[in-house]
Structure formats: structure tokens, C-alpha cells
Amino acid sequence: MVPVPAKGRRVQRMRRQPDKRRIVPKPRRPTAGANLPARHPLRHAEFLITAADWPQLPAGGAPEVAFAGRSNAGKSSAINALTQRTRLAFVSKTPGRTQHINFFRLPSGALLADLPGYGYAEVPAAMRRHWQRFIARYLAERAPLIGLVLIMDARHPLTELDSQMLDWFLPSGRPVHILLAKCDKLATGEQRRVLDAVYEALTESYGGRTAQIAVQLFSATRRLGVAEAERAVESWLAPLGT
Ligand SMILES: Nc1nc2c(ncn2[C@@H]2O[C@H](COP(=O)(O)OP(=O)(O)OP(=O)(O)O)[C@@H](O)[C@H]2O)c(=O)[nH]1
Ligand SMILES: [Mg+2]
């Protein structure tokens, strides 16, 4: 069965207008410079630096978008899909391979941060504690962080640790865009069921903050939902001129 293209949805809007499901920002209208080649702010990203602890985070204050999620959920694959690079972020069949925050720089100067995956049982307890503290602080306090792309395996969404990430990040008031990744592994009907179930659960748990949260289906391998995800990230960067 051929999966339908994923549709993003803003949690709050869905509740008021249940039949209007397409809620990702509209593509920006071309104004001045309309004859110039289309701008692709996420293309031509380059690896910048790896950070293992707070003092190693890039200085300079360039706006940053973080990609977080469970170990093996598809974070690095999502970054590669959005930047249209095949091997920018390291993709591995072995879970727990990304042990540091890897930063990639876009031509505008803005940064993409590939966070270490959480929830991998084989990681030693001391390392897990270190990462939990580092990531909690990063999500809550990192000043240049303008938005979080939270990647969940569509077959196992909203784990306890996923909720933990939302609990750390949402009080910052900044937006979260959830990708239900590897949706190609689900039949079309199941994709819709999962999207609805996640939407309901988020509305129930984060009723007061739903304007900050959007959720969509995504597949890096089939390139489903890539345009929606791109628009979300670009909508965070564009107002900053990045
Ligand atoms: N079928 C399918 N497989 C995917 C998709 N995205 C990633 N994968 C596979 O899932 C595995 C993990 O992908 P990664 O992108 O490395 O996941 P990650 O979250 O960065 O993993 P860690 O950094 O180790 O936590 C790889 O074997 C990918 O090829 C997808 O959309 N569909
Ligand atoms: Mg990775």
C-alpha cells in the first residue's frame, strides 16, 4: 500500500476546527527578489563542532534548532533529509551511536544540533546521568535555541522519556515540531490512527501549551512529510533573517 503524504497539524487549531487538518504555515509569498532562484535555507549545511558538555557548546549566539529523540528514532536521518545531504549526520543501525551534540552550520549561520539519543538500555548509568543533566539544562537554558524537532518512532510514540523532553523544553515557551518518523513502516490507516492518538494524548497532557506543539507523520527513507517539516523549521529561522 502506498502511504499518503503526511499532513502536519497544529494541536490547538485541530480542536477548534476538526475538519481543517492542514495547519503547517503556508509557504511564504514571493515579494521583492521574486525572480531570484528559490531560497533553500536548510541546504548546504556543514559539520561545525561536537560538544560533550556545556562549555563546548558553540559561542556566538547564532540561532539553533535542536533535533532530539529516542536512540535510533531517526534523528540523524531526519537532519539528512531536511538538509538534502546523504551523510551529513551519521546514521547507524546500532542504537546509541550519537554520544555528543553534533552541530551543523547553515549558510545563514544558523545551527542545527543533533542531540544524543536517549533510552538506550546499554548505555552505562553514569553516562546516562551525565547526558540527562546536560540535555535537561540544554533544553531549558540554552539561549540561542529557537525550536525543537522531537523525533519519535511512529510505532512507539510518546514514551516516558519523550514526555520528559517536552516537560523540560515547553516551559521555555519555544515551539516543538514532532516528527512521527519511520511512518513508512505503518499501513496508511495505521498512520492516521497513530497521528490522531498522539494528537489526543498531547492535547490531554499539554492543554495549556498546545499552541507551541505541532505533530506530523514523517519518513526519511520515503521522503514523506519532508516539505512540512522544512517549512516548520524555516518558519522559526525566517523571522530572525536566517
Ligand atoms: N524505514 C525507515 N528507516 C529509517 C527511517 N529513518 C531512519 N531509519 C533507520 O533507522 C536507523 C536509525 O536511524 P538514525 O537516523 O541513525 O537514528 P538516530 O535517532 O540518529 O540514532 P542515534 O543517533 O543512534 O540515537 C537506521 O538504520 C536508519 O536507516 C525512516 O524514515 N524509515
Ligand atoms: Mg543519530
Image (spheres, rainbow, N blue to C red):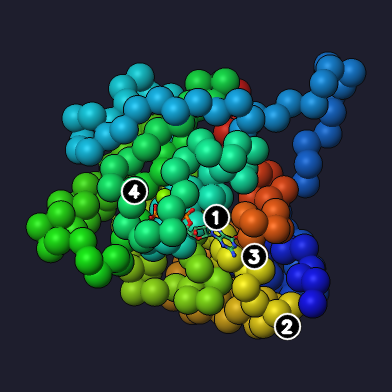
Q: Earlier in the sequence, mark 2 or mark 4?
A: 4
Which percent across, then down, holds residue 161?
33, 68
> Which is closer to the viewer, label 2 or label 4?
4
Q: Is mark 4 within 8 Å of ligand 1?
A: yes
Q: Residues within 10 Å of mark 1 (few under 14, many from 20)?
A: many
In this rendering, would 215 be left or right of 159?
Answer: right
Is 74 situated above or below 33? below
**What mark, if any, has residue 217 been given in the picture?**
3
Q: Residue at x 79, y 77 (%)?
A: 1
In this rendering, would 163 be left or right of 105?
Answer: left
Residue at which label 4 appears: 98
Q: Residue at x 42, y 39 (%)?
A: 113
> Which is closer to the viewer, label 3 or label 1?
3
Residue at which label 2 appears: 189
Q: Is residue 196 shown to the viewer in this render?
A: no
Q: Residues within 10 Å of mark 2 (few under 14, many from 20)?
A: few
Q: Amino acid at mark 3?
A: Leu
Q: Tell whether label 4 touches label 2 (CB within 8 Å).
A: no
Which percent across, then down, holds residue 101?
33, 41
